[in-house]
Amino acid sequence: MLDAVDTELRRRYPGSNGRSQPIHTVYVPADRVTEETPAEWGAAAVGLLDRHHDLLATLDATGSLPDVRKRLEADPVQDLRIDFEDGYGLRADAEEDRAATAAGAVLAAWARRSGGPANSGIRMKGLGGGERRRALRTLDLVLEGVGGVPAGFVFTVPKIRAVQQVSALVQLCVGLERAYGIAEGSLRFELQIESPQAILAADGTAPVAAMLTLSEGRCTALHFGTYDYTAALGVAAPDQALDHPAADYAKAVMQVAAAQTGAWVCDGSTQVVPDADPEAALRNHHRLVARSLRRGYYQGWDMHPGHLITRWLATYDFFRQAIDVAVPRLRDYLARRGGDIVDEPATAEALAATVLRGIECGARPDAGAAELTETVLRALAARAPIPTEAT
């Protein structure tokens, strides 16, 4: 009987999916995106950094600003969604058809050459009755324009409210894969959680957990929609923000639902951009990103080139400081493997996972290299036996 329980737990909670989670997802309206958008965003961010260098230096806790500037020049955007929803709005069908085909061509170009984001896709319109037909047609045209499913492609589905919508998404993916002759399981999606009904249903359950189960492994992430969610609760517009207590509650439920499933949790966005008051906006975004990282949300939305600066700066600072703490503790943990152990295995797992995240995002590529090999780190993070030769 317990063997069956073990099997079911392993199926539902397989742990890390082995992929590197991007630090952000950039949203660009479909009528504004081109092949050069990532490079243009990076150049705009470098210009803003140089103009406000002195301010940003006061936010830099680890001397990371020069490395952030290099990152913005070389590889500013890790993940990008071509937006057909709120950032694009309602258009004539013919106009959105053209935009969807063009978006497919842009995604195909990024897949063919370096310089594009490692991960990319679209955010289509929602599955509600008024938008459903348009959403599905846009997705179909994008896939046709791409000519398949490029590596790292995912589509984001906004305004999910019911578990039945996820079952329909799975069937949609199966049908599209068959129609295009692509490998089963190639199409994956993200669920945008921005409706209270996705967090707490009428029967008192938390639908977001069931949604992950019904996705049959196709749901790669849960994305939080800051403004739709808080507006649906009746929060006044001036108080709608990532750090509102209502937003914190929803994200905590998402975090628990996604824990050990392999699905990521992505924080939402701020509508405060560094245009009218750049210094206030940069400080605010840096604060919000640092706050999210401390709460275990390692990815968030970026809506403006200026957000790239403070996203990378806060992320580098966070992981550099965390690695400086984690590596000595892991070294001590390994040294005590044959005797008394202070840190528990779960703590060592978390410490190793933190170091790996820091390495993968580029905050400190050589972190612990003199003392901890990647083999040891991955074994610790998975709480698996460490090969003798690796020690």
Image (tube, helix red, strand yellow):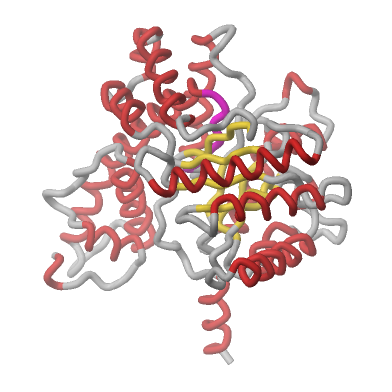
Residue at 33 percent of width and 14 percent of height? 57
State yes or no: residue 302 in magenta: yes
Could you tell me which quadrant the N terminus lies in? bottom right
Asked whether the viewer can see residue 199, the reply is no
Residue at 53 percent of width and 35 percent of height? 26
| Apparent side of residue 209 relative to residue 373 in the rendered image (left or right) | right
Determine whether 214 is above or below 107 in the image: below
| Apparent side of residue 186 relative to residue 116 in the rendered image (left or right) | right
Residue at 29 percent of width and 61 percent of height? 378
- Locate residue 382: give its quadrant: bottom left
- Where does residue 231 sit, x and y in percent of width and height? 79, 32
The part of the chain drawn in magenta is 298-304
Could you tell me which quadrant the C terminus lies in? bottom left
- Where does residue 74 sit, x and y in percent of width and height? 31, 31
Determine whether 6 is above or below 335 in the image: below
- Where does residue 20 sit, x and y in percent of width and height? 40, 52
- Where does residue 271 sit, x and y in percent of width and height? 64, 23
